[in-house]
Image (cartoon, rainbow, N blue to C red):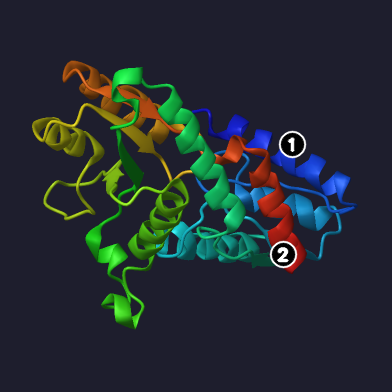
């Protein structure tokens, strides 16, 4: 997996951004599922004398997987480490202007990569990680706070489309797992590409708005499976870059820290 290298590249960019603005804070890195594990990182922070820290999660979203699970990670790490520092998670950033601007410019750059004859008519398709429908519905209907994740993804897509001047676009999902009888958010990106082909759409610009870096679920599900299926159907395909490589992403992190 490229995820550790991608996260360290973001950390390097944030370090430069902090230094340029006189923010003298150390930066640590911890994972939920692979080394460096967050428990080990919190222990090292404690040993380094850190008493309070801000936590930037590489997810822009609310909901269980996008937010609450990170709070569980924080609580688990603190329970595992005696005299652990206080850890405060920074807020969601799905609608932050710097995030929206980075994604918007990535879509523009991706469209330029398409052949001249399909560039202007290419369909913009936003995608994010699917989750079980029951997870997304936690909290009840939208007016009662439910569907927070899918609503925020839809709002981010709307903001980017508005900046692009796109009135008509799609939001689909990817990377589902688990038993097939458990309902997840749909449609799937590959199924949607097939449906667009049946409608006569000649090309797509796929926008992984739900991800901040090109980890496995981007390079496999989009750059491999979705791209290959589009090629089999004779459709033009271009994938927008994720926001984490844009210099504005490090600025976003710095601004979230400044808020606190």
| Quarter in which the C terminus is drawn | bottom right
Residue 239 in the image: above or below residue 159: above
Pair 2/1: label in front: 1
Residue 200 in the image: above or below residue 29: above
- Residue at mark 1: 12
Instruction: Say which residue appears at 32% left-offset and 74% top-offset.
Output: 146
Residue 212 can be seen, yes or no? no
Q: Secondary structure at mark 2?
A: loop
Residue 18 can be seen, yes or no? yes
Which callout, 2 or 1, points at the residue further toward the start of the chain?
1
Where residue 10 sits: x, y (%)?
A: 66, 39
Where residue 259 sits: x, y (%)?
A: 73, 68
Crowding at label 1, few (<14), some or many (≥20) Cα neighbours within 10 Å? some
Quarter of the rendering containing residue 227: top left
Q: Nearer the viewer, residue 100 or 115?
A: 115
Would residue 154 be found to the left or right of residue 183 on screen?
right
For the residues bearing labels 2 and 1, Cβ distance under 8 angstroms:
no
Instruction: Say which residue appears at 61% left-offset and 52% top-offset.
Output: 98
- Residue at mark 2: 82
């Amino acid at each position: 997996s490229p995820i550790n290298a991608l996260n360290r590249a973001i950390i390097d960019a944030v370090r430069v951004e902090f230094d340029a603005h006189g923010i003298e804070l150390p930066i640590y890195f911890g994972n939920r599922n692979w080394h460096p594990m967050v428990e080990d990182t919190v222990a090292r922070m404690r040993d380094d004398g850190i008493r309070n820290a801000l936590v930037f999660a590489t997810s822009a979203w609310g909901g269980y997987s996008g937010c609450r699970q990170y709070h569980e990670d924080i609580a688990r790490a603190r329970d595992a480490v005696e005299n652990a520092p206080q850890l405060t998670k920074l807020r969601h950033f799905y609608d932050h202007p710097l995030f929206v601007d980075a994604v918007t410019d990535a879509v523009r750059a991706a469209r330029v990569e398409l052949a001249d004859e399909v560039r202007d008519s290419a369909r913009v398709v936003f995608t994010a990680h699917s989750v079980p429908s029951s997870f997304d519905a936690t909290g009840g209907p939208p007016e009662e706070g439910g569907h927070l994740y899918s609503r925020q993804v839809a709002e981010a897509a709307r903001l980017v489309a508005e900046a692009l001047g796109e009135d008509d676009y799609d939001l689909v999902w990817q990377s589902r797992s688990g038993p097939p009888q458990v309902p997840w958010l749909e449609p799937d990106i590959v199924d949607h590409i097939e449906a667009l082909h049946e409608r006569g759409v000649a090309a797509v610009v796929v926008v992984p708005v739900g991800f901040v870096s090109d980890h496995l679920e981007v390079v496999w599900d989009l750059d491999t499976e979705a791209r290959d299926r589009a090629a089999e159907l004779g459709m033009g395909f271009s994938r927008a870059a994720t926001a984490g490589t844009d210099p504005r992403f490090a600025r976003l992190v710095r601004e979230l820290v400044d808020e606190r």
